[in-house]
Image (tube, rainbow, N blue to C red):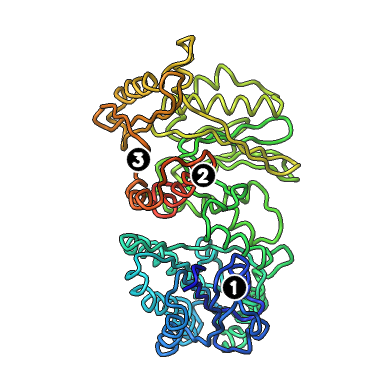
Amino acid sequence: MSDKHVVLITGCSAGGIGHALARAFAAENCLVVATSRSLPSMANLEHDKRFFLEELDVSSDHSVKKAVSNVLENFGRIDILVNNAGVHCVGPLAEIPLSAIETTFNTNIYGSLRLIQAVVPHMVNRRKGMIVNMGSVAALAPGPWGGAYTASKATIHALTDTLRLELAPFGIDVVNVVPGAIKSNIENSAIASHDRMPEWKLYKNFEEAIRARAYFSQRSKSTPSEEFAKKTVAALIDPSMADLSSLHSMGNTIIGVTYCGGVILGSDSRTSTDHVRYHLQSLGQPATVKLAAHLVRQISHNKNMLQTGMIVGGWDKYEGGKIYEVPLGGAIIEQQPYAIGGSGSSYLHGFFDQQWKEGMTKDDAEIFVVKAVSLAIGHDSASGGVVQTVILNSEGVKRNFYHGDYVRYQLQSLGQPATVKFAAHLVRQISYNNKNMLQTGMIVGGWDKYEGGKIYEVPLGGAIIEQQPYAIGGSGSSYLHGFFDQQWKEGMTKDDAERFVVKAESLAIARDSASGGVV
């Protein structure tokens, strides 16, 4: 049996996202089972030996069972299931025939569930596998005339989050892919849906706007499906290959600072993912900072789940650099020349009062932001990791990462290099003073000329335990013990060890809802 990944993809008609995903998986040396309701719709793949074509109607129980059975008979397994098949439904919810909504749900929701229920027992037997569900940014920012489609994708998001928890004990990864505006043939489905609708009564005067909704994601600046597929597949095959330059995030300490010519945002790296950029893609043109701030406010309507306000900063050609604060109450406040927030902000007001200077250069402003976030990391137990900065100006966006390690600054006072064991004792002392705020233990690793490379664990109880050859901790560690048991190799080179660590962290981020950001 081949050791190549066997990938089953639904909805692979030419011109669509599924078709592009099939080609991208094949380019990664996978065995691709490309499916659609009609084999002629995939005719250009027919003579390519990298593809196994299968007729599959996701709305039919019989068709799903037959297709999955054929794949298992031919290849013996399914490593990755990609639920891509979907149809649009355009029109006002108050007038769309329920039969049209049922058709949309039967394909977009129940179609995915049919495949999942057919494939999961096989994956459970092997204790491995991946299920990839195709969501949509529309589920995160609903708009008029697409309510049925949006509801179906919101359901997919919820199902995916639940399945991730339910299937994790069986070694099965469940991934939610959230495309923005992707160039594809979905407009054909949307137009066909619109043309089947009866004449609107309540919304007759909105006919032109309703029809325009069918073309909403297919504008000139929509991402080509090939580009989307290539990056998506790279991240699925190896999470460490995800495009880090495109990540947008916010941390437990957040800062926005204006300078002459732009804005600099800073945060620590204990992050939650920021979907705003993907929402803005649907506009088809650059948005103003104020519009982005209003979008953040709309997304954060679930204020009962928030623990701190948010900061939106950016540059646009109309108003230049701007900073807006979205506090817990839901207002939007323009802040000049700076804004600070998050749990670490309580330690920064005095620093800003003393150190802030009007008219700083870009370099001075970035140094100022890095110092401020580092100070917050040193004092606030909820902030941590590295310092992230984002520079926004007329030239675009630039991201930088800086160490924000408070312990290192404490050790400088010794006047000479410290041993790793001494550093571990210092961590223990600092953490003991804040032990009531800690939720997990810590790991101290380093190299000194006396003992070489050493790793120490500082658990919540306050002890110091020397760990060799490795240590894992945090909420994501529960997903890593099996990975370490299977994949750890004694005597790895530096490069091999780093790749191992990146894969382990990526695995934890994918499975643990409390982990996130960059590795």
- Identify the residue under disc 1: 22
Residue found at x 59% / y 31%: 338
Secondary element under disc 3, as helix, strand or loop, is loop
Please provide percent x and percent y for residue 400. Answer: 62, 36
Please provide percent x and percent y for residue 495. Answer: 54, 42
Sooner in the amino-acid sequence: mark 1 or mark 3: 1
How would you rate the neighbour count of disc 2 (Cα within 10 Å): few for under 14, some for 14-19, many for 20 or more? few
Mark 2 and mark 1: Cα distance apart in space: 30 Å
Q: Is residue 299 or residue 112 the one in the foreground?
A: 112
Q: Amino acid at mark 3?
A: Gly
Mark 3 and mark 2: Cα distance apart in space: 21 Å
The quadrant in which residue 188 appears is bottom right
- Identify the residue under disc 2: 496
Whether label 2 touches label 1, CB < 8 Å: no
Q: Is residue 270 or residue 192 the one in the foreground?
A: 270
Sooner in the amino-acid sequence: mark 3 or mark 2: 3
Q: Is residue 264 left or right of residue 464?
A: right
Q: Amino acid at mark 2?
A: Asp
Q: Is residue 422 above or below residue 105?
A: above
- Identify the residue under disc 3: 473
Secondary element under disc 1, as helix, strand or loop, is helix
Q: Is residue 147 or residue 439 the one in the foreground?
A: 439
Q: Name the outermost residue toward the top.
A: 415
How would you rate the neighbour count of disc 3 (Cα within 10 Å): few for under 14, some for 14-19, many for 20 or more? some
